[in-house]
Amino acid sequence: GAVVHWFKRDLRVRDNTGLSLAGQLAKEKGIGVIGVWILSPQDWEAHLVSPQKCDFELRSVEVLQKELAALDIPLHIEVVERRKEVSARLISLAKQWGAKNIFCNLEYEPDELRREEKLARLMLEEGINLEPQHDDCVVPPGSLATGAGKQYAVYSPWFRTWIAHLHKHPELLLQRPTPSKNPSFVRDKFAQLFDLPIPTAPASKSMDEGTKTRMGQVWPAGEAAASERLDRFLEEKVGKYQATRNFPALKSTARISVHHAAGTLAARTSVRAARDVNSTKRLDGGNEGIRGWISEIAWRDFYRHVLVHWPYVCMNKPFKHEYTNISWEYSTTNFQAWTTGRTGYPIVDAAMRCLLSTGYMHNRLRMITASFLAKHLLLDWRLGEQFFMLHLVDGDFASNNGGWGFSSSAGVDPQPYFRVFNPWLQSEKFDEEGVFIREWVEELRAVKGKGVHNPYEAGGEAERVARRAGYPKPIVEHKMARTRCLERYKEGLGRS
Ligand code: FAD
């Protein structure tokens, strides 16, 4: 026999709840642990996983395989084309290995919860126990409620309760023990499971060699890379996080979302590490940067709690039903200008080009570009949500959906709909010197001074440079767009 851990969005050995428990049980029984990772191309397709993210996961699996091998734990790697067949395959593997216990960590989207619930039943019929664990959130969904026993729909009071809960339950932040080395017979008995080849990305998710190499350099994969990035951030940047986090050109945030999304780093590990460098050794008090950073990671938990409580957000529905009634513009031309970074709003274009090139966008820019799509272009925010998923290396349903809901005002704890970001002001405020714009909008690199924010408005040399380089004029006029947005949103909301 053996105890199995099924890896999903938790591609790491350290601080992994399911794997840790699998290790403990195996030790008690004097048997070995086997890891399984199954790639279902259909699943990737259905979840709009970006090529960048696929590549990151595959590279992370390669690292995982090595980290596990160092503990003499084999990793069974397999491609199962159809999503529906994954469960049956897991059962047949468990039977083949004589495994009675399969651990895994829960994913909270309704499809995944349903799959695991069914799998648990099917396994039970075969005398196998599926043991899903809470691991992805720092505080498991369902733990926090308002005084009236309801799920919070507003972040701030939820966050206070989150902090209090963690102070009351410090065990939630404890590091889960890494499994010990497998007994030596496992190497022989399961020899064929060691060093299995890492699959290549499905055709629809593949990238050319140049891009792959570049992505490999920008986003080193695996848990060792994650913990190095975390340590460096906590040493060098977290102290000033609160003061610097909104300025993309400063590159002052952790850039660690890719690891939280693939599970090469647990959110718990990040929060614990940040707490431990705080002078108070607590989540509150002490350094403002540390507190601020912890509260950003809490947003990730918040959106997951929302998803579990209101699963319809996964079904293409706005959190607030009345937002179903807004009549969107359906302009393919404008959508294309947005997706290719040719809106004539340099801050928006810089952000979109950065996304296309690196699979990443700074949080402030995600808010600016999302707001621009939903409010200035008045395009259905779900188009933007999908486009982000298809291009983000850190694409994550709950955080992305939450972010789009916030920016479009259709989501939980949103920006009020009548607050329409002024992209020109956002640009001047958060990229004052135009450093970020010049990094990504080649056409405007030669523009000196503030004209870079809006060269056609600035006129003179700025305009000449923009014109010569073929940089587009703004595709919508700000004042008109703002008025149109307010009218259309008001009308839509009034109709419900
Ligand atoms: P830091 O500022 O260093 O924050 C630390 C960690 O906290 C992040 O790694 C992330 O895990 C978490 N976090 C920070 N801000 C948020 C937030 N607003 N919501 C949820 N978690 C947060 N984040 C994703 O991980 N995947 C997405 O697909 C995603 N889509 C987004 C879409 C929109 C429209 C918006 C506005 C935000 C989105 N975010 C998403 C949240 C946020 O922009 C990124 O997590 C952040 O920019 C990642 O950079 P970082 O690791 O340097 O973050």
Image (cartoon, rainbow, N blue to C red):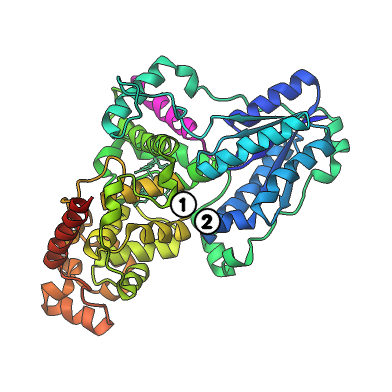
Horizontally, residue 64 falls left or right of residue 181, namely left
Q: Are marks 1 and 2 in contact (CB under 8 Å)?
A: yes
Q: Name the residue beneath numbered marker 1.
A: 395
Instruction: Tell me what residue is drawn at x 39 percent, y 39 percent.
Output: 303
Label 2 within 8 A of ligand 1 by Cβ: no
Circle 1: element type: loop
For the residues labelled 1 and 2, the Cα–Cα distance comes to 7 Å
Residue 15, magenta (yes or no): no
Residue 281 shows in this picture: no
Q: Which residues are magenta?
A: 265-282
Q: Count of labels shown?
A: 2
Position in image of residue 226 (x %, y %): 52, 42
Q: Does 304 appear above or below 142?
A: below
**In the image, what residue type sits under mark 1?**
Gly
Query: For residue 75, what is the image quadrant?
Result: top right
Report ligand 1 position as a quadrant.
top left
Instruction: Tell me what residue is drawn at x 28 percent, y 22 percent.
Output: 285
Horizontally, residue 454 falls left or right of residue 43, namely left
Q: Name the residue beneath numbered marker 2.
A: 49
Query: For residue 36, what is the image quadrant?
Result: top right
Split into 4 quadrants, where in the image is the N terminus? top right
Q: Label 1 crowding class (10 Å Cα cut-off): few <14, some 14-19, many 20+?
A: many
